[in-house]
Image (tube, helix red, strand yellow):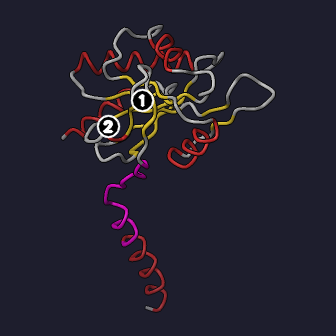
Amino acid sequence: MKNTCYLFIPLVFTVWLSACSSEPQNGKEAIPFSYTDQNGQPFGTDELAGKVWIADFVFTKCTSVCPPMTIEMADLQKKFEDEGIQVEFVSFTVDPTIDSPEVLKSYLFQFTDDESNWHMLTGFSQEEIEVFAREQFQTIVQKPSTSNQVIHGTNFYLIDQQGRIVKEYNYVDESYVEKMIKDIKKLHK
């Protein structure tokens, strides 16, 4: 009987812990921000309030991951439009000293002709974007002094209508689009 008690306590504890985690986890709420978009206009959390949005980090002089990431975002924009899924796209530059609004606008139009729901943001210092990426999205942004390339994360982030980071996706994962669509549809219910 004594041994049964020792087996029963861990079982009860495990069930109790799993019950606690069955509630949906709310992501970290993004701190309010307002930066400058590709049209030279202020854009930030006020304009995104009540909307689902997808964020990423790119820069226009990138010679590796940014062009494929931006192609993927453009594909998402088209796919979501075709399926009637309402989403805003927000790309934060990780090289704000180079990426002015004009440079970002020119870059964006290499990938899409629809900027109605895609906002490429600048208007912050290098240090600000490094801290913002780390503290809000738990991702790295670092510009080495010995290179014109910026080290940065390559995930896409899904943010809900309350500004909470819900999930992140690796854009090279073949099944991420289907997962993202399911997750967005849940948010719109």
**Residue 133, relative to residue 155: is it above or below?**
below
Earlier-in-chain disc, 1 versus 2: 2
**Residue 6, relative to residue 71: is it above or below?**
below
- Kindly give the residue lying farthest to the right in the view shown: 146
Give residue 65's mark.
none
Q: Residue at the location (63% across, 26% down)?
A: 97
- Is 26 part of what is drawn in magenta? yes
Q: Amino acid at mark 1?
A: Val
Tell whether label 2 touches label 1 (CB within 8 Å): yes
Q: Residue at the location (37% across, 48% down)?
A: 164
In the drawing, does residue 144 fall left or right of residue 168?
Answer: right
Question: Relative to the observer, which residue lies in front, 62 or 4?
Answer: 62
| Secondary structure found at label 1 | strand
The image quarter in which residue 157 lies: top left
Q: Amino acid at mark 2?
A: Leu
In the drawing, does residue 143 fall left or right of residue 133?
Answer: right
- Would you call the spot at circle 1 few (<14 residues within 10 Å), some (14-19), or many (20 or more)? many
> How many marks are shown on the rendered structure?
2
Residue 135: x %, y % from top left: 55, 49
Residue 5: x %, y % from top left: 44, 87
The image quarter in which residue 52 lies: top left
Placement of the N terminus among the 4 image quadrants: bottom left
Task: Find the distance from the CA under tag 1 to the CA under tag 2.
Answer: 10 Å
Placement of the C terminus among the 4 image quadrants: top left
| Secondary structure found at label 2 | helix
Q: Main secondary structure of the magenta part?
A: loop
User: Range of the magenta residues?
Assistant: 16-31
Look at mark 2 in the image and give the residue it sits on. 48
- Kindly give the residue lying farthest to the left in the view shown: 189
Give residue 90's mark.
1
**Residue 109, relative to residue 161: is it above or below?**
above
